[in-house]
Image (spheres, rainbow, N blue to C red):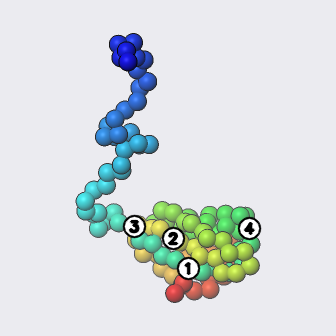
Amino acid sequence: MNTENRNDLGLKDTGAGCACCATASTPETADAATAAVTADVLVTGMTCSHCVSSVTEELSAIDGVEGVSVDLNAGGASRVTIRSSTAIPAAAVEAAVEEAGYAVAGSPS
């Protein structure tokens, strides 16, 4: 096989740090001050993506909330996961959900 006339394809070794090929490197220890806090609540009344958007928008407006994800259970209790930099008071979560037009049914067991 003639290797002298090969075209360089620009491919990188997997150890080169390419995001799509290399393994992710994470710090060995997480700083307690920057560790995210997660909380799950059950919310009733949501039936569609618009409902999810409304709840997500209201919860995201709470100081300290970094992310919201919803596992929609149309017509039932949907699991809402809130990621924040500090613990969010349950009353603030409930008020935000009610502002969006829905109700907190409690925490999943």
Q: Residue at x 48, y 76 (%)?
A: 39
- Residue 48, percent from left and from top: 74, 67
Q: Nearer the viewer, residue 48 or 5?
A: 5
Give the spatial CA distance, label 3 vs label 1. Answer: 16 Å
* Badge 3 or badge 1: first in the primary sequence: 3
Of mark 1 and mark 4, the one earlier in the sequence is: 1
Graded by Cα atoms within 10 Å as few (under 14), some (14 to 19) or many (20 or more), the crowding at tag 4 reads few
Residue at (54, 84) in percent of width and height: 108
Q: CB under 8 Å between callouts 1 and 4? A: no
Whole-number angstrom distance, CA of label 1 to CA of label 2: 8 Å
Amino acid type, label 2: Ile
Q: Nearer the viewer, residue 20 or 3?
A: 3
Answer left or right for 109 relative to 105. left
CB contact under 8 Å: marks 4 and 2: no
Residue corresponding to mark 4: 48
Foreground tag (3 vs 4):
4
Q: Secondary structure at mark 3?
A: loop
